[in-house]
Image (cartoon, rainbow, N blue to C red):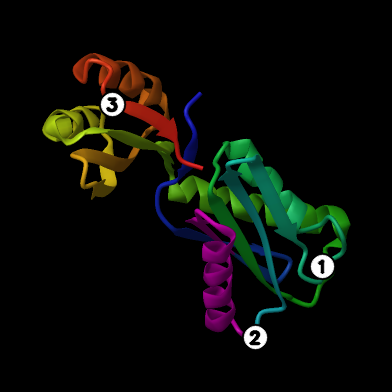
Amino acid sequence: MPLQSVSAPARRQLRVLGSRFIACAAPANSESQARNLRDALRSEFPDATHHCWALRLRTPRGERELHDDAGEPAGTAGLPILQALRRTGVINALVVVVRYFGGTRLGKGGLARAYREAALAALEAAGVVEIVVMSRLRLSGPVVRDGEVRRLVARLAGRVVRASYGEDSDAAFVVEIPEGAAARLRSDLARVSRGSWEATDCG
């Protein structure tokens, strides 16, 4: 199943017994980007009672999930928001739910339902888009085949990130290529260059 993230930032509002929940879903490709998004919402809603959130990221070591109840009773806010992210199957996505307390306590079950429903509404409004995961490779070989190698990379929807040329007529490229096309690039590179170019993983 292809990886998916939210396609665009979206917001939805939910009112429960006087409390107002403003759910904000947005794509986030790193913890620092998610932190910046949360800071922006804190500036926009400085008088809110709580800013609860959850984040799902794809990292080289696998999926990473983070959440914060932000002062709500443990397990009533961050985890339900994370459950909404899991239910929709999105990755590299952040949901922040801003709450304005309305004076009536909702109880732990009521709180969890409200945060989860608000998060799901924002995620539904945001929609999904497929994530193309990129691999980074180092290609090296005789400069005489520079053009052929560049065309091969482009044909497989990749791009040359960096190129360098040595004094001994050799060239080296750092390229990004869709993860699913990396094996094809290796085999086509050997064929096109007649074995004179090689591909290695970038560390």
Q: Secondary structure at mark 3?
A: loop
Q: What is the CA distance from the residue labelled 3 to the residue labelled 2?
A: 60 Å
Instruction: Give coordinates of residue 192: x percent, y percent.
Output: 20, 18
Asked if residue 41 is among those painted magenta in the image, a careful observer would answer yes
**Furthest residue to the bottom?**
47
Q: Nearer the viewer, residue 125 or 183?
A: 183
| Marks 1 and 3 in Cβ contact (< 8 Å) | no
Q: Percent x, y for residue 95?
A: 59, 57
| Marker count (numbered) | 3
Query: Marks 2 and 3: in contact by CB < 8 Å?
Result: no
Q: Position of residue 130 (x, y in %)?
A: 41, 36
- Depth check, mark 1 against mark 3: the one in front is 3
Q: Which residues are magenta?
A: 23-47
Q: Is residue 96 above or below residue 59?
A: below
Which amino acid lies under the numbered mark 3 shown in the image of this protein?
A: Trp
Mark 2 — residue?
Answer: 47
- Asked whether residue 172 is drawn in magenta, I would say no
Q: Are marks 1 and 2 in contact (CB under 8 Å)?
A: no
Numbered circle sitting on residue 197:
3
Q: Is residue 12 left or right of residue 80?
A: left
Mark 1 or 2 closer to N-term?
2
First reached walking from the N terminus: tag 1 or tag 3: 1
SS class of the residue under badge 2? loop
Please identify the quarter of the rendering in which residue 69 is found: bottom right
Tell me the element at label 1. loop
Most extreme residue toward the front is 168
- 74 vs 189, nearest the viewer: 189
Q: Which residue is mark 1?
A: 72
Above or below for 130 versus 103: above
**What residue do we see at 51% from left, 64% from top?**
33
